[in-house]
Amino acid sequence: MKKIVILISGRGSNMEALIAARDAGTLPVNIVAVISNRVEAEGLETAAKSGITTHFINHKAFAGREAFDSRLAQCIDEFEPDLVVLAGFMRILSDGFVRHYEGRLINIHPSLLPSFPGLHTHHCTVHFVTPALDHGPVIIQAAVPVLDGDDEASLSARVLQQEHIVYPQAVRWFVEDKLTLENGRVRIAAELAEPPVLISPEIR
Ligand code: GRF
């Protein structure tokens, strides 16, 4: 079974969605470690309760970004993961780190700007992390509507719900060898019927 390491800095709800999918038997993966750069990250406790090995590496204890990243990479590599999953990891990663994990480092982020101007939708995106690009090649996105009376909290909650669907989906594709990064482009196995953008039922 493929191994993944998850990096977090806080709440860890995306990490929880991955653990839940694993426990439900829909994500055949071995979560070998959860690493946080913040000791107070709630997700550390959640992971430990699920029996997952956790590590805390304090970025403030290092002289600079490279030094921290190299310690982090050393810790990750001890677990020999097939995939490194950023799940609310609040650090800019150095080019060297990102290159080291090329094709096996993914991230999720929510948009704070309307995804399709005029349509009142927001989205979240799962993408490979590459040094050259801001966002990196997109694996899957989900779009949600902005409803009357929405505020930032209700909108983020709606986007987060979709994050918890698309992130396990992207990891599932990866661990089933249906997703790769080739020459800077995402390749998803042809037999997959899922569209690259999941539109939430409210806007369909
Ligand atoms: C999520 O919105 C994720 O997309 C972004 O940071 C947030 C982390 O939330 N990168 P959680 O820690 O997974 O609950």
Image (spheres, grey):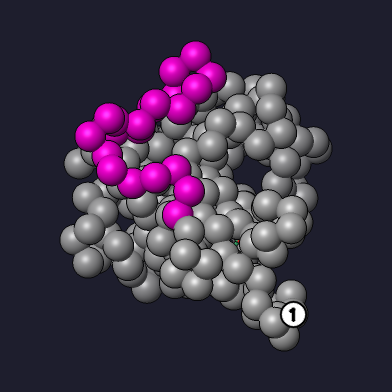
Q: Amino acid at mark 1?
A: Asp
Quadrant hosting residue 87: bottom right
Corner quadrant of residue 151: bottom right
Residue linked to disc 1: 151
Q: Is residue 134 magenta?
A: no
Count how many numbered circles sit on residues in the image: 1
Residue 117 lies, with reference to residue 13, above or below; the image says above
Using a 10 Å C-alpha cutoff, classify the residue at mark 1 as few (fewer than 14 neighbours), some (14 to 19) or many (20 or more): few
Query: Whole-percent x and y of residue 37?
Result: 64, 54
Residue 10 at x, y percent in the picture: 61, 65
For mark 1, give the secondary structure. loop
Task: Say if residue 56 shows up in the picture.
Answer: no
Please state the horizontal and vertical placement of residue 180, each as a whole percent of the image: 38, 27
Q: Residue placed at 22% from the left, 58% from the top?
A: 26
Q: Is residue 32 left or right of residue 160?
A: left
Compared to 178, does 166 lie above or below?
below
Check the image and report above or below for 149 versus 165: below
Q: Which residues are magenta?
A: 178-198
Picture residue at 65% right of the left edge, 77% below the top? 147
- Left or right: where 137 falls relative to 200: right
Nearer the observer, 195 or 177? 195
For ligand 1, give the image quadrant. Answer: bottom right
